[in-house]
Image (cartoon, grey):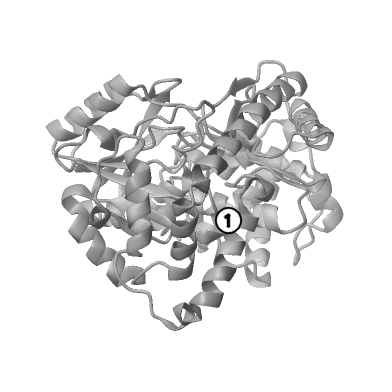
Amino acid sequence: MVPADHPLGGHSLYGVYAVQMAPSTSVLQHSYLQLAQQVRRDIAQQRYAPGERLPSVRALAAAQGVSVATVVRCYRHLEALGAVQARHKSGIYVAGPAAARVAPDTSNDMGTLGPQAGAQSKPPPVEFDRLVSLEHRMTELYSLTTQQPLQWGLHLANASPAWYPTDALARIAQRLLRSQPEMLGAYPTGSGLPALRTELAGWMATYGLDLQPEELLVTNGSTEALNVALRAVTRPGDAVVVESPVYFGLLQMLGNLGLRAIELPCTPGEGMSLEALEYALEHQSGVRAVVAMPNFQNPLGHVMPDRNKRRLLRLVEQHDLALIEDDVFGDLSHTPQRPQPVKAWDRHGRVIYCGSSSKSLAPAFRLGWTSGGRWHARMESLKLSTSLAAPWLEQAVMAEFMRSGELQVHLRRLRERLTQTTPRATDAVRKYFPAGTRVHSPAGGWWLWLELPHPVDTLALLRQSVAQGIAFTPGALFSTTAKYASHLRLNTARPWTRELEQAVRQLGQLATRAQ
């Protein structure tokens, strides 16, 4: 969990660090509801006039002798009722008379809103959700997408299970277990199964990486690869440059490691703005690393041109930094040509390369790999102390699959499917979503990144869509700020059917009504 006082926990409208909400006990409910009723009485008795700023979270907490969390929940509750309005970087203000009549407070003195009232209340707007941390928004996403069955889990980070070579992998696993059952009784150790590292080195040579098997470290997914890379090159309090929008798992990881994220904008079709990077490196202190996804960036799906990749490498060399390259989507080009990683031009060990099988081959294997350059020995030590080794059965199955030559066949088929589905999904969004919706159609991978007309709040939209069995990823997760509150990420790696098109249509209709 991101600690409440951590820089990445996010700030409230008053500069107070956001806090993680405490468990919903009856005592806490009683406390924040009583406080909310008191504020409503003060407003009704004209102690605060319409449009007047209310006390800050910290000031009200001190005056009433309650916790900051209680005041945050109080203001959240009043915002949902339409009694107050949150203004970004300004504060909480008394709503005008018309807004204040939007929703009556149907809670009693000792309880929370009843089911009927909760169903009728308008979902809290995004300004309101900025009071809490990214970790809280992540918790809400998981809660919303797991509390009921979803027919269309378009928020997930994998393709349709039918698009993976599951039968072939299962047959290899069965054969290995029959011939080598002792594998299950052996304790996995080392930097990775030698057979797998040999196959990986051979595969990566096809797209320009000249690596020896001993230069590779097999990890428990790319998440662990990124984690040990960051720990190898930084210390708590250091700054790390990231793309914006950026994969929310990376933001969580930085927070957990006590690192500061410096978000730099991505230019469509160009990747991270290198002009912004140059400026940041000249004016920001404590920067130790850059984390980038040059190939099919998540969530934009764009590829950084080779000239920019080489320039990015020159910048990290000039400023004595590490470049942590996340290439997990690199094999998912929508064309036969696989783009080269920045690591292909690295001659001084400045690039820490991270890959994974989770997107392209077998999500359940949770196998990743990394080549740490000048930091490789340090990363091996950190990996050993963290999780010892990756599971050997999965490594053995993957090595055998790669040795058979089936990986090339599988990837070609997967790319063809993505190439067929993505344009149809893009057309459906343009047809069914509100006028003015901007679609970033990827050059690889399986995301559509949508920018809805302001002020559609996609977190509130998600609360509505899950009731219809449809989930997506709201844009508020892709930054520590609220600048993507009207964006969403949609996974289109599914067979295109009439039912899927209908789901996109339903989602578009909800977005239109939310304007």
Picture coordinates of residue 365 (x, y %)?
51, 60
Residue in the image at 66% along x and 34% along y: 95
Taking depth in this image into account, of 290 and 485 the one nearest to the observer is: 290
Question: Is the residue marked by circle 1 packed among few (<14), some (14-19), or many (20+) residues within 10 Å?
Answer: few
- Name, please, the residue furthest toward the top: 436
Taking depth in this image into account, of 174 and 46 the one nearest to the observer is: 174
Which quarter of the rendering shows the C terminus? top right
Residue in the image at 40% along x and 66% along y: 390
Which quarter of the rendering shows the N terminus? bottom left
Is there any visible trace of residue 83 in the rendered image? no
Residue in the image at 41% along x and 32% along y: 295
Residue in the image at 48% along x and 40% along y: 13
From the image, tell me which residue sits under label 1.
139
Picture coordinates of residue 333 (x, y %)?
50, 31
Q: Is residue 82 left or right of residue 221?
A: right
Taking depth in this image into account, of 292 and 459 the one nearest to the observer is: 292
Is there any visible trace of residue 76 in the rendered image? yes
Q: Where 451 sits versus 476, above or below? A: above
Q: Where 317 sits versus 107, above or below? A: above
- Name, please, the residue furthest toward the right: 116
Q: Where 331 sits versus 73, above or below? A: above
| Amino acid on which the number 1 mark rests in the picture | Thr
| Image quadrant in which you'd find residue 436 | top right
Picture coordinates of residue 327 (x, y %)?
40, 41
| Image quadrant in which you'd find residue 420 | top right
Taking depth in this image into account, of 486 and 182 the one nearest to the observer is: 182
Count the labels in the image.
1
Picture coordinates of residue 213 (x, y %)?
27, 54
Q: Is residue 11 left or right of residue 431?
A: left
Mark 1: secondary structure: helix
